[in-house]
Image (cartoon, grey):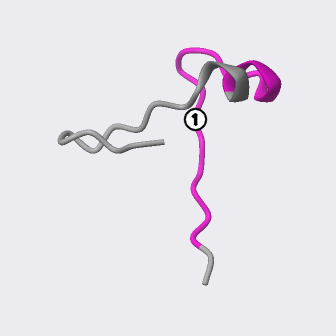
Amino acid sequence: MRITIKGQVTIPQEIRDKAGFRPGTEVDFVIGD
């Protein structure tokens, strides 16, 4: 995945389908060490 100049991340369609993400779905990022 890449981050745009505006800070947006595009999640690949395959991942969105498997995770059940739809427009408006909120996601959290977990930062690991």
Q: Secondary structure at mark 1?
A: loop
According to the picture, the residue beneath numbered tag 1 turns out to be 26
Which residue is painted at 33% across and 37% down in the image?
A: 8
The answer to if 7 sits in the magenta stretch is no
Relative to residue 1, is residue 15 depicted above or below? above
Quarter-of-image position of residue 18: top right
Residue 23 to residue 28: above or below? above
Q: Position of residue 9 (x, y in %)?
A: 41, 38
* Side of 18 where 24 appears, left or right: left
- Which residue type carries mark 1? Glu
Of residues 14 and 32, the one nearer the viewer is 14
Task: Provide the residue span drawn in magenta.
Answer: 16-31
Q: Residue at 71% x, 29% y: name it.
A: 15
Quadrant of the rendered image containing residue 32 = bottom right
Residue placed at 63% from the left, 19% from the top? 13
Q: Position of residue 2 (x, y in %)?
A: 39, 43
Neighbourhood count class around disc 1 (C-alpha, 10 Å): few under 14, some 14–19, many 20 upward: few
Which secondary structure dominates the residues rendered in magenta?
A: loop
Q: Residue furthest left?
A: 5
> In the displayed structure, does residue 26 sit left or right of residue 18?
left
